Image (cartoon, rainbow, N blue to C red):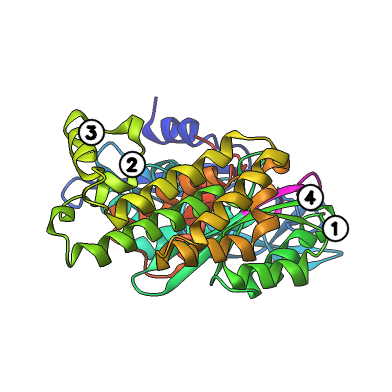
Amino acid sequence: MRDIDLFQMALGLSKPWYVKRSEFDPAARRLDLYLDFESGGTFACPECASSGCKAYDTTEKTWRHLNFFQHEAYLHARVPRVKCGQCGIKLVDVPWARAGSGFTLMFEAIVLMLVKSMPVSEVARTLGEHDTRLWRIIHHYVDQAVAERDFSEVHSVGMDETASKRGHNYITLFMDLEERQLLFATEGRDARTLSAFREDLEKHGASAEQITEFCADLSPAFQKGLREEFPEARITFDKFHVVKLLNEAVDQVRREEQKSRPELKGTRYLWLRNPLTLSATQIAQYDRLHLPSLNLKTARAYHLKLAFQEIWQLQLAEAEVHLKAWYNWAIRSKLEPMKRFARTIREHWNGVLNWFQSGISNGILEGLNSLIQAAKSKARGYRSTRNLIAMAYLIGGRLKLATLPI
């Protein structure tokens, strides 16, 4: 069998296309395949799909293909323009590459497969391409898959922000809490992100009115956006963010008291954990620091924390009674960080108690944030927010990418 026949079979070419010749340069580690079409061959119009269109003229094009063993491979072809009676003169689509791409479909398929587990910069080094060209591939298929999604059955949404760069640069993520699918990602973390999400919902066959449940942190900006864009949705404040604020209040008490009580040094993580998760060494330390004679403010704050956390084990009616009693205790505690936390709970009372009816939280979003940050760390950051958003969709969007020949 001739080499060109073998390459023709490997490429899956059909008439009128064929491999005309090949050139192999072992010194340059490169294989070049030259394709052509049969004289008199006809093509389909790329716009209206009318068949039987004859070539009007041709233009030379080149595509990067999968490596031939360790050698880079390229396809070259004179691509015809056809004259269609309805559409005029149009450049035909070739079966081995998408329009406008400098890569074959098989090469793009490998790129999409590799970037799910490797940083794009590393994939670029492996394939011998500039990462900017690979990002163009990623954006094309991600944007295409995102545009084709249907949100008509979405009812319960969680939202949270994640850092895009050092400093105060963020993107906000919106997730379908029922299907555990990233719906939308956008730059910023203010009320405008809710407006952008509402517009995106409408582009995908949904409406703001169909969203009945929202889970969010206690950000005033998020609350403002929710009131303006999703006034009918019930808001549940994420229990993980509530507990995080509670832990921060306890830690603030410890840091202030530590200035005059040296026995508290090195005990930060003791107060962040629950008694059942303490090690034997930490239990001994816990018992020593809770002696009544010490009368530590941090120990009192810790007891307030444990009492607050009992709320999550109760039913709604009991929880509200327990929370009222806890609030009165915290306000009288003379521990300013705990009093500030109690006031925050009072200001967000209904949203906190809504958890006992909705049962939703942003735990799945916290997991997605961890995966996104891990990918960002492995890649040593992304040059643009658009790149980070594309990677977020690849990680959490459950996208149905275009079927490619691999």
Check disc 4: other Cα within 10 Å, few if <14, some if 14-19, many if 20+. Answer: some
- Tally the numbered discs: 4
Q: Nearer the viewer, residue 26 or 164?
A: 164
Labelled pair 3, 2 in contact (Cβ < 8 Å): no
Q: What residue did someone put label 2 on?
A: 273
**Identity of the amino acid at label 4?**
Gly
- Residue beneath disc 3: 283
Up-down relation of residue 317 to residue 137 (above or below):
above
Q: Position of residue 238 (x, y in %)?
A: 58, 51
Kindly report which numbered mark, 3 or 4, lies closer to the viewer in this rendering. 3
In percent of width and height, residue 267 lies at 20, 50
Q: Secondary structure at mark 1?
A: helix
How dense is the environment of label 1, judged by Cα within 10 Å: few (below 14), some, or many (20 and up)?
few
On residue 52, which mark appears?
A: 4
Q: Is residue 40 visible?
A: no
At 81% across and 55% down in the image, what residue appears? 206
Q: Residue furthest front?
A: 293
Residue 305 in the image: state x and y as whole percent.
Answer: 43, 48
Mark 1 vs mark 3: in front: 3
Which is more N-terminal, label 2 or label 3? 2
Q: Amino acid at mark 2?
A: Arg
Q: Observer-nearest residue: 51 or 134?
A: 134
Residue in the foreground of this view, choosing between 99 and 279: 279
Magenta residues span 145-158
Labels 1 and 3: the sequence-earlier one: 1
Report the Cα–Cα distance between label 3 and label 2: 11 Å
Residue 286 falls left or right of residue 244: left
Which residue is identified by label 1?
209
